[in-house]
Amino acid sequence: MRRTIFLVASLVVSVFFLWVALRGVDFQQVLKSIQQAEIGWIIASFLGITAGLWLRGVRWYFLLDFKPPLLKTCHILNLGFLLNLLPFRIGEVARSLLITREGVPVVTAATSVVLERLIDTLLVVILLVFSITRIPNTPPEIIKPTIVFGAAVVFAFAVMVFFARFPVIGHRVLAFIERLFPFLKRLGMEKLFDQLLVGLKPLTHLNSAIYALAWTLIGWAASFFTLYALVRALNITSADGSALDESSRILLTLLGLALASLGNAVPISVAGIGPFEATILLAGQTIGIPKESAISLGFLFHGINIVGYAVWGVVGLLATGVSLGDVMNTGRKVETPESA
């Protein structure tokens, strides 16, 4: 019953966001724009999503302490991305459990996924702040709070890394906060706090932190190129019909990438359909491109992501020698659907 409700809710969310994104759109213009897209840039975009997946596999290999084989690690990660396209989005749970078959401790597998999410979230916030503050004619009343928010997130991340290095201090601070706000004890904050500290532990060593952050930047550079190539493929113009300059293309790509990542984090949707397109539309209209161009970009970018995840996920499925049913059952060992 719970799964049925979750599936129906996912469908409703996807339909709602699609309706918001597509109302008032000239679909003939969208179709024409996609048909006229330069195939060379589309192929380049697919190569970008491919590189991004495998580079994230290399990062995960490091976070797993180089214990499983690199190729097997990449295949399992790609399989996880494929599963995140399906209802219930069990990809992260499934891959963290599957990798334990390669001799990785359960705690190491789980905390590696937590650390991935924390680093990626930090980078998304930085991209978002950078993009918003670079948009022409952005009012100061928006820029200042945005900068403050970004700085606060970076500071909070740094504080958590400090607590991971000195957990005794962290627990003392948490105990003090819980004395001030007793209701926090009922929320299980200590358990969550411990999980975060364990996840951040690799960043408490300089070499490990540099390695993790470097591979994160390299992987996201591939994601940037994936979207940038599609901006070029569509030959997107501004609202007045003039060609976008290079700085506008880059800004559109950065903002689109950050917002799409936030949209993809919505746990209740069908393969991200709806929220993904709505966020790309928001990025496009913020930069000042026609609505049809933004929707075309959203469809293409989402399509390239789905194709990339599907192709390399199936390859991962075949390479690991497990059945889809086995993987699905592995992911459902947890009681609640995985939020991605």
Image: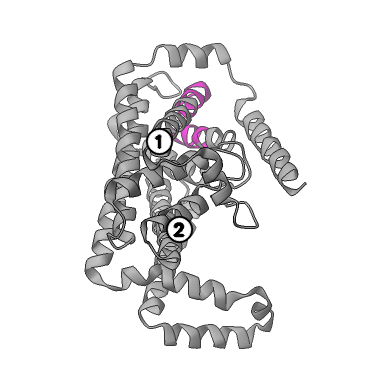
Q: Residues within 10 Å of mark 2 (few under 14, many from 20)?
A: few
Q: Is residue 42 above or below residue 1?
A: above
Q: In the figure, residue 10 lies in which quadrant?
A: top right
Q: Which of the numbered marks, if any, corresponds to residue 318?
A: 1
Q: Residues within 10 Å of mark 1 (few under 14, many from 20)?
A: some
Could you tell me the amino acid type at mark 1? Leu
Residue in the foreground of this view, choosing between 193 and 230? 193
Given this view, does label 1 or label 2 mark the residue nearer the observer?
1
Residue in the foreground of this view, choosing between 222 and 141? 222
Residue in the foreground of this view, choosing between 159 and 98? 98
Whichever of labels 1 and 2 marks the residue nearer the N terminus, that label is 2
Could you tell me the amino acid type at mark 2? Lys
Tell me the magenta residue range. 280-298
Q: Residue at x 47, y 38 (%)?
A: 82
The stretch drawn in magenta includes residue 291 = yes
Residue in the foreground of this view, choosing between 121 and 84? 84
Specify whether 305 is left or right of 229.
right
The stretch drawn in magenta includes residue 246 = no
Specify whether 36 is left or right of 9.
left
Q: Residue at x 55, y 71 (%)?
A: 192
Callout 1: helix, strand or loop? Answer: helix
Q: Is residue 137 visible?
A: no
Q: Which residue is mark 2?
A: 144
Q: Is residue 200 visible?
A: yes
Callout 2: helix, strand or loop? Answer: helix
Specify whether 13 is left or right of 340.
right
Q: Residue at x 34, y 28 (%)?
A: 46
Q: Which of the numbered marks, if any, corresponds to residue 233?
A: none
Q: In the figure, residue 204 lies in which quadrant?
A: bottom left
